[in-house]
Image: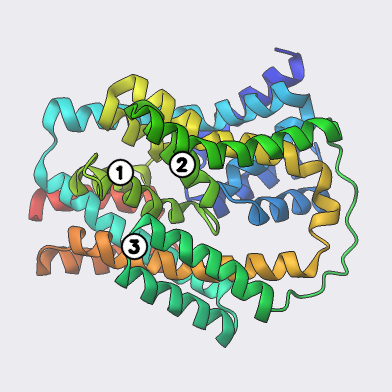
Amino acid sequence: MTSHAFETFRIFLLLGLTSFGGPVAHLSYFREAFVIRRQWLSERAYADLVALSQFLPGPASSQVGMAIGLQRAGYAGLFAAWAGFTLPSVLMLVGFAYGASVLGLDAGLLQGLKVAAVAVVAYAVLGMGQSFLTDLKRGAIAFMALAVLLLLPSSLGQLLVIAFGGLAGFLVLHAPADHTPHETLNVPVSRAVSIICLVLFFLLLAGLPLLAAAAGDPLLHMTDSFYRTASLVFGGGHVVLPLLQAEFVNPGLVSHETFLAGYGAAQAVPGPLFSFAAYLGASMLGLWGALIAIIAIYIPSFLLVTGALPFWDRLRALPRAQAALAGVNAAVVGLLAAALYNPVFIQGITSLTGLALALLCFAALLSRRVPVWAMVIAAGIAGQLLL
């Protein structure tokens, strides 16, 4: 590992240990660390990377980190940035999975974590709605997506509403013109490598389901599920909740209780929400499952960041591409709202006491004075005492 790559790993490891608050907060931490303090890139170049992360499916903050590492130290820097930022939360959530399954956690504590998940997802729906539903057309796309998923709560329904959102955005929405000049990004990736990465992304997306069905191997099926989920997540890390729920809870691979307790715990640890995949993998297949899950859910990001960066200047200038993305973002608000009802609210609120606790947690998040991790810990303690 080069000195630049080791430096990248060290800085991102510190960020992975201290970055609470979700993707938006992570991006603020990154800006402070790499634009203001170290001046690794300019304000405008950083804004271009953030814009790319919003355009691509996958975890926004992790992909910005990968892009920063790639520009700083090449492919080794990309891997170092991802490993440093992701490792702390992965270890914490795998430890929680073993604590829940081996030691046996108090039922009240787990119920409190599920209540916290209700507040967190409700707050995410509110925030994403304010950001993405800026007119009646976008609101209509979100409402139709919600209606479809309440009637068809499955992975097929989720695919349909994402495709519908993109098509509706392409046909009826208009992306705002961006006349702000942007600078050329320093990307140490050849065009040939970029094309190979993009082709490989689509080959895996199409080929893994066929291979998993033909082989009947549970490890291959799990790899396909995590890869496909990461390839469809637009709009923020919380959207991973309904997609993973459809892949693992509906078929009975993970119970509702285990799933929502882990999702609540994921809010209390620093770093990316996609580390929740390691918790699910550990819950199903132990350490080997956690390793496969965390690699599979991040492979799309590795391929897309490497493949798209050299073409980003042209891509972001296409108004129809921006309009299609706006439609997808509107649809995922409806997708997350459907998940808020089922399974989050249905499984998380089982009494009036739980409802009152959820409202208090939601009010704490609205105040913006209580960090998410502190609210989750408080909800777990309250659940142990009251539920």
Task: For label 1, count other residues whose C-alpha is less than 10 Å away and answer few (under 14), some (14-19) or many (20+).
Answer: some
Q: Which residue is mark 2?
A: 274
For the residues labelled 2 and 3, the Cα–Cα distance comes to: 17 Å
Task: For label 2, count other residues whose C-alpha is less than 10 Å away and answer few (under 14), some (14-19) or many (20+).
Answer: many
Residue 85 picture quarter? top right
Task: For label 3, count other residues whose C-alpha is less than 10 Å away and answer few (under 14), some (14-19) or many (20+).
Answer: many
Q: Amino acid at mark 3?
A: Ala
Out of 363 and 369, give the one closest to the viewer: 363
Q: Earlier in the sequence, mark 2 or mark 1?
A: 1
Residue 92 picture quarter? top left
Q: Which residue is mark 1?
A: 248
Label 1: state its secondary structure. helix
Apparent side of residue 73 relative to residue 379 in the rendered image (left or right) = right
**Residue visible at 52% across and 34% down in the picture:** 16
Tell me if residue 61 comes above or below residue 345 in the rendering. Answer: above
Nearer the observer: mark 2 or 1; the answer is: 1
Q: Position of residue 112 (x, y in %)?
A: 19, 52
Label 2: state its secondary structure. helix
For the residues labelled 3 and 1, the Cα–Cα distance comes to: 14 Å
